[in-house]
Image: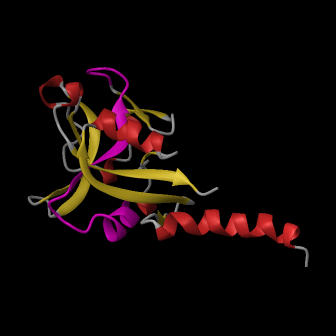
Amino acid sequence: MNAMLLLPILLSLLQTAAPASSGWLRSPQGTVVKLYRRSLSWSKADEFCKDVDGRLVVDRTADMHLFLIKNVLKEKKSRVWVGLRRTAPHSRTWIWSDGTRQNEDDLNTNLWLRDEPNDAAGEEECALFMYSPWEKAWGLNDYLCRGGCRNYQFICEKWIR
């Protein structure tokens, strides 16, 4: 077979295999995800994920939620940024990093910790995934992120090309 005919096939295989070999895990959404252990503000983590041709992870389904718990979040002390934030301070509208907007009433409450999101002190605008020792469970929590005052690990997600 002509080597020129094989080249596109080989390149395709290399692109598909590369994410897994560099710490990326295939998710049930058809994407790959990677936990970055460096701590950044939500906005810096968002920029970082875009710089690696991805986005902060979108965690709005039970399948993705369980996948992240079982395969990515192994340390119960972890707090990690995900791709969800309010569209404005005190807003009840949220936007995912894929551009999808959701009213707070339409968010999947099974993915959130008890009584969340609560916008405590009117300043919790970003979502993070954390383990609650009181609930003995993982869940989403709205959290202070304005001004880059909190730095946490984060999960990037990207489509396999």
- The span shown in magenta is 65-91
Residue furthest to the left in view is 134
x, y percent for residue 76: 17, 64
Q: Position of residue 137 (x, y in %)?
A: 20, 62
Task: Name the spot of residue 122 as percent of width and height, x first.
Answer: 17, 24
145 lies left or right of 55: left
Q: Which residue appears at 31% of the width and 22% of the height?
A: 91
Q: Residue furthest front?
A: 3
Q: Using the rendered image of the protein, determine whether residue 104 is visible from the camera's viewpoint.
A: no
**Picture layout, residue 69 above or below residue 159:** below
In this view, 158 is above or below 75: above
For the view shown, which residue lies furthest in the bottom direction? 1
Left-right relation of 158 to 9: left
Q: Kindly tell me whether residue 55 is visible in this rendering.
A: yes
Q: Is residue 41 above or below residue 71?
A: above
Give the residue at x 19% y 49%: 114
Q: Is residue 131 left or right of residue 134?
A: right
Front-lying residue, 14 or 147 = 14
Which of the two residues, 34 or 107, is positioned nearer the viewer here? 34
Residue 66 shown in magenta: yes
Q: The C terminus is located in which quarter?
A: bottom right
45 and 111: which is toward the camera: 45
Instruction: Answer whether residue 114 is magenta in the image.
Output: no
Q: In the rendered view, tell whether residue 92 sits above or below residue 78.
A: above
Residue sitting at 42 percent across and 66 percent down? 23
